[in-house]
C-alpha cells in the first residue's frame, strides 16, 4: 500500500470509529464522505458531520452542502462522494441533474426531507436578493489515470470544469492535504529579482522606476513583463511546493473564470489586438516584501530590483489569470503574453498594522475575508492554548485540520469562525446576526482587534482578557446544541435545522446568572436546553397561528430566525428584559 492510500485509510478508520453510532451508521463510505468534504472545505471533521453532511437516505442524491458567505453574495458548495475506483457516467449525470432540479429549477422531488433545510436556505437567500453561485464537487476514491478503469480519464475530460463541476480523485485530495499541511510549516525563503522596464517615451534618462518612502515603508512602482510574474509563481512553487505562501496575506481566494472580470481579463490577454493594452486596462499587482534593494541607476541599460519573500496582497485574480494563460500557452506551444506588461507596486515593510492597511486599501472590488485576517490576531494564541489544555482543537488557520495534533487524533475540534459566531449569538446576544451573516460577525471581531472599538478589551490579545473563559462556555453550549440536533431531527421538528443560534442564545440567557453551571453540573445544560426549546416552540406556534389568521401559506423558518423579530419574540415569551449594560458585563465577566 502506498503512502497516499495508507494516509487516507487511516483517516477513514478513525472517522468511522469516531462518528459511528446506533442512530447513524458511519461505515467506510460515509467516512469517505466526511473525509473528502473536509478536505475540500477545509472544515473540521466534526463540523462536516454536524452541519455539512446530509444524513439519511432522503438526501435527494446530495451527500453534502455548504453555503459560503462572501459579503453580498454566496457560494453553495454541493457534494457527491463515491468510495469507488471508477467514474461512472450515470452517476455524474444524476448528480448534475439532482443539483439542477433541487436548487436551480426548484423541482419538488420525493425523498428530499433530509436536505430540505439547505433547499429552504437557498430559496430564502434568492428571495432576499442574494446571488448564489453553485459549485458542484464529485469526489471519488479512485484515480483519473487508473489503467484498470480506463474510462476515468475520458469521464474526467468530459465533465470536469473548474468552479462549475469539479471532479476530485484521491490523488487530488491527497495533494491538497499535503499543501494544507505545508502551509503550516515555515516558508522557504524566496529572493526574487524584478526587472522594471524602462520608458519607451523618454529613452535618454531611462525612466521606469518610481521610488519613495513614507515613514518606515519604502515603495517602488514600475512595470514588468507579464511572464516575469509567472516566473515569480513558479519560483514559489519550486521552493515551497505550493504558491499559497505567495498569496498568504491576500484577503480573498481565486474567484475562477465564472466571474465576468476574470473572463474579460483572459479575453484581453488572448486577444491579438487587445493584449498590448493590458497595463492600461488592469489595476496591476500590489506586493509586500520583507526587504528590497533599490538600484541607484540602470545596469547594462536595465534596472534590477531584488526582493526578499514577496507576498501578493492585491492582484491575486490578475496573477492567477495571467498564470493560467501562461500554462495554457505552454501546452499549446504559443505565446499570448509576448509584449504584455503588468504594473507593480512593491512595498518594503514588516509592520503588520501597515500591511493590514495596505491590504484593505488596495482591495476594493470584492468583499474581504475577515476570517483570514482575524486568524493572525494575537488573541488566537491564547484561545488555542487554553482549548488545547481542555483537549479541544481550536482551528484558526488553513491546514490546521490536518496538522493540529488534537485534530489529527479526531479530538473535539472547533473552527474559529464557528466558535466566534456562536459567541456572537450568546454572549453578544445577537443570534439573528450570527445566523444571518458570518461576514458581519468576523468584521466586528476584526475591528475589535484594531484601534478604538467597544470590544477591544476582549480581542486586543491581552492574556488577562475575559474572552477566553467566555469562549470556553460558548463551546460547551455549542457542542450541546449540536449533539441535541439529532433528537430534534428524529422528532421530525420542521424548524430543527434553523434554530441552533437561537437555542444557544436561550441556553446562555437561562444560565447567565450562574455561568459556571454551563459546565458544572452538566445537567443544568439539559434544563436550560429544554426551557429554550419549549420557548422557541411556543413562539413558532404563535407565528404559525398568525400566518393562518392572515391567510398566508406558510412560515419561512430560514427567514424568521434570520431576523431580530425572532429574538424579540423569544425574549418576550421568556420574560427577558434587555438592558444597555451588555458591554460592561462582557468586559467584567469571567
Image (spheres, helix red, strand yellow):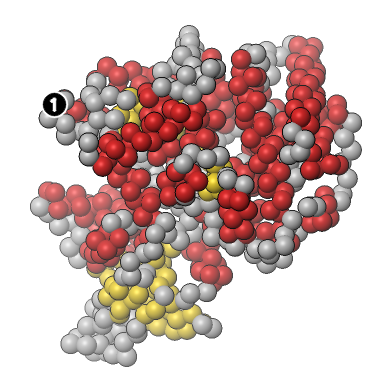
275, 395: nearer the viewer: 395
454, 511: nearer the viewer: 511
Does 158 appear above or below 6? Answer: above
User: Residue extending furthest left?
Assistant: 333
* Total number of numbered discs in the rendering: 1
Does 32 appear above or below 515? Answer: above
Name the side, left or right, on which 250 lies relative to 473.
left
Query: Which residue is located at x 23 percent, y 52 percent?
Result: 325
Residue 143 position by quadrant: top left
Residue 543 visible in image = no
Query: Which residue is located at x 69 percent, y 37 percent?
Result: 477
Say which quadrant the N terminus sits in: top left
Name the side, left or right, on which 544 lies relative to 385.
right
Residue 238 percent coordinates (x, y): 24, 61
Secondary-structure class at tag 1: loop
81, 254: nearer the viewer: 81
Residue 524 position by quadrant: top right
Name the side, left or right, on which 18 lies relative to 580.
left
Query: Which residue is located at x 44 percent, y 43 percent?
Result: 408
User: Residue extending furthest top?
Assistant: 110
Does 494 appear above or below 578? Answer: above
Query: Which residue is located at x 26 percent, y 42 percent?
Result: 3
Residue 479 visible in image = yes
Residue 372 percent coordinates (x, y): 51, 54
Local crowd size for mark 1, using a 10 Å CA cut-off: few (<14), some (14–19), many (≥20): few
Query: Can you identify the residue that label 1 sits on?
Result: 148
Name the side, left or right, on which 455 lies relative to 366.
right
Residue 441 percent coordinates (x, y): 64, 47
Does 423 appear above or below 33? Answer: below
Residue 52 percent coordinates (x, y): 50, 30
540, 424: nearer the viewer: 424
Amino acid at each position: 500500500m502506498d503512502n497516499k492510500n495508507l494516509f487516507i485509510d487511516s483517516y477513514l478508520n478513525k472517522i468511522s470509529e469516531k462518528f459511528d453510532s446506533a442512530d447513524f451508521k458511519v461505515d467506510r463510505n460515509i467516512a469517505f464522505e466526511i473525509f473528502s468534504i473536509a478536505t475540500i472545505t477545509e472544515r473540521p471533521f466534526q463540523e462536516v458531520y454536524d452541519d455539512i453532511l446530509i444524513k439519511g437516505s432522503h438526501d435527494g442524491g446530495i451527500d453534502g452542502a455548504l453555503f459560503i458567505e462572501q459579503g453580498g453574495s454566496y457560494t453553495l458548495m454541493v457534494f457527491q462522494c463515491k468510495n469507488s475506483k471508477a467514474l461512472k457516467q450515470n452517476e455524474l449525470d444524476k448528480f448534475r441533474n439532482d443539483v439542477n432540479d433541487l436548487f436551480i429549477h426548484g423541482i419538488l422531488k420525493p425523498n428530499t426531507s433530509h436536505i430540505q433545510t439547505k433547499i429552504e436556505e437557498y430559496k430564502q437567500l434568492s428571495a432576499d436578493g442574494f446571488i448564489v453561485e453553485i459549485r458542484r464537487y464529485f469526489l471519488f476514491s479512485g484515480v483519473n489515470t487508473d489503467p484498470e478503469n480506463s474510462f476515468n480519464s475520458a469521464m474526467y475530460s468530459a465533465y470536469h470544469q473548474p468552479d462549475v463541476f469539479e471532479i476530485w480523485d484521491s490523488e487530488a485530495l491527497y495533494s491538497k492535504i499535503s499543501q494544507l499541511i505545508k502551509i503550516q510549516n515555515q516558508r522557504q525563503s524566496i529572493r526574487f529579482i524584478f526587472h522594471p522596464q524602462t520608458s519607451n517615451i523618454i529613452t535618454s534618462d531611462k525612466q521606469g522606476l518610481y521610488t519613495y518612502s513614507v515613514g518606515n515603508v519604502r515603495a517602488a512602482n514600475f512595470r514588468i513583463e507579464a511572464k516575469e510574474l509567472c516566473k515569480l509563481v513558479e519560483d514559489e512553487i519550486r521552493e515551497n511546493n505550493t504558491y499559497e505562501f505567495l498569496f498568504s496575506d491576500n484577503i480573498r481566494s481565486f474567484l475562477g473564470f465564472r466571474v465576468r472580470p476574470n473572463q474579460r481579463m483572459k479575453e484581453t490577454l488572448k486577444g491579438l489586438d487587445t493584449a498590448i493594452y493590458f497595463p492600461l486596462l488592469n489595476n496591476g499587482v500590489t506586493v509586500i516584501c520583507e526587504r528590497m534593494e533599490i538600484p541607484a541607476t540602470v545596469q547594462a541599460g536595465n534596472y534590477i530590483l531584488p526582493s526578499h519573500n514577496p507576498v501578493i496582497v492585491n492582484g491575486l485574480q490578475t496573477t492567477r489569470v495571467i498564470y493560467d494563460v501562461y500554462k495554457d500557452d505552454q501546452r499549446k506551444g504559443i505565446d499570448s503574453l509576448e509584449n504584455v506588461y503588468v504594473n507593480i507596486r512593491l512595498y518594503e515593510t514588516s509592520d503588520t498594522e501597515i500591511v493590514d492597511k495596505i491590504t484593505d486599501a488596495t482591495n476594493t472590488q470584492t468583499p474581504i475575508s475577515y476570517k483570514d485576517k482575524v486568524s493572525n490576531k494575537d488573541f488566537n494564541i491564547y484561545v488555542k492554548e487554553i482549548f488545547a489544555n481542555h483537549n479541544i482543537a481550536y482551528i484558526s488557520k488553513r491546514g490546521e485540520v490536518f496538522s493540529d495534533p488534537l485534530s489529527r487524533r479526531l479530538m473535539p475540534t472547533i473552527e474559529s469562525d464557528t466558535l466566534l459566531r456562536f459567541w456572537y449569538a450568546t454572549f453578544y446576544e445577537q443570534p439573528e446576526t450570527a445566523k444571518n451573516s458570518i461576514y458581519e460577525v468576523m468584521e466586528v471581531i476584526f475591528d475589535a482587534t484594531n484601534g478604538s472599538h467597544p470590544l477591544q478589551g476582549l480581542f486586543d490579545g491581552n492574556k488577562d482578557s475575559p474572552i477566553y473563559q467566555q469562549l470556553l462556555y460558548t463551546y460547551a453550549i455549542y457542542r450541546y446544541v449540536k449533539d441535541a440536533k439529532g433528537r430534534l431531527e428524529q422528532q421530525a421538528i420542521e424548524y430543527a435545522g434553523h434554530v441552533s443560534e437561537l437555542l444557544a442564545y436561550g441556553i446562555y440567557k437561562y444560565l447567565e446568572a450562574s455561568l459556571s453551571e454551563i459546565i458544572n453540573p452538566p445537567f443544568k445544560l439539559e434544563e436550560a436546553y429544554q426551557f429554550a426549546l419549549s420557548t422557541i416552540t411556543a413562539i413558532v406556534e404563535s407565528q404559525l397561528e398568525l400566518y393562518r389568521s392572515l391567510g398566508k401559506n406558510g412560515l419561512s423558518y430560514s427567514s424568521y430566525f434570520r431576523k431580530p423579530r425572532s429574538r424579540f419574540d423569544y425574549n418576550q415569551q421568556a420574560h427577558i428584559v434587555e438592558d444597555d449594560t451588555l458591554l460592561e458585563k462582557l468586559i467584567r465577566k469571567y
